[in-house]
Image (cartoon, rainbow, N blue to C red):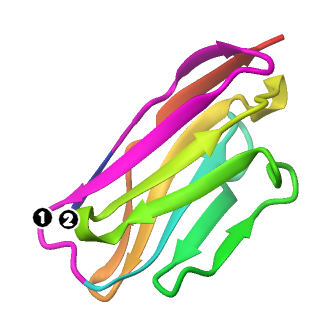
Amino acid sequence: VQLQASGGGMVQSGGSLRLSCAASGRASGIYVMAWYRQVAGEQRKLVASIANGGNILYDDSVQGRFHISRNSALNSVFLQMDSLKPEDTAVYFCHFNTARGVYWGRGTLVTVSS
């Protein structure tokens, strides 16, 4: 299973971006899809997750600004990011927890300028 993330880029403070992540290969039995982000020198942190049953979690720092969604038929997860702030600047990684194991995407850079 390989995860391909896209949608990162550079945006001004207050702007929006939409990240996408799709799984290729035998990606069956996906329990949880999630987005993490990492700033250089810091640990990777959970941004948002969505479980197979629809349960959604957000980090407090993005609550009300980010929206996670999934298309289970296409093995895809999305992250709509609005009202972006400079502190949202990071490399964003998608993460799938499946019956076959845990998989990470390669990361996509999001840069928010003030």
Callouts 1 and 2 close, C-beta under 8 Å:
yes
For the record, the magenta segment spans: 5-28
Residue in the image at 65% along x and 20% along y: 111
Relative placement, left or right, of 19 versus 17 is left
Residue in the image at 71% along x and 21% along y: 15
Would you place residue 72 above or below residue 41 in this image? below
For the residue pair 108 and 22, the one nearer the viewer reads as 22
In the drawing, what numbered circle is on residue 1? Answer: 2
Q: Gap between marks 1 and 2, in whole Å?
A: 5 Å
For the residue pair 15 and 25, the one nearer the viewer reads as 15
Relative placement, left or right, of 38 versus 26 is right
Q: Position of residue 17 (x, y in %)?
A: 58, 29
Would you place residue 91 above or below residue 31 in this image? above
Please check the rendered image and state whether residue 88 is part of the magenta-colored stretch, yes or no. Answer: no
The amino acid type, in three-letter code, at marker 2 is: Val
The amino acid type, in three-letter code, at marker 1 is: Gly
Q: Quadrant of residue 65?
A: top right
Element marked by disc 2: loop
Q: Earlier in the sequence, mark 1 or mark 2?
A: 2
Identify the residue under disc 1. Answer: 25
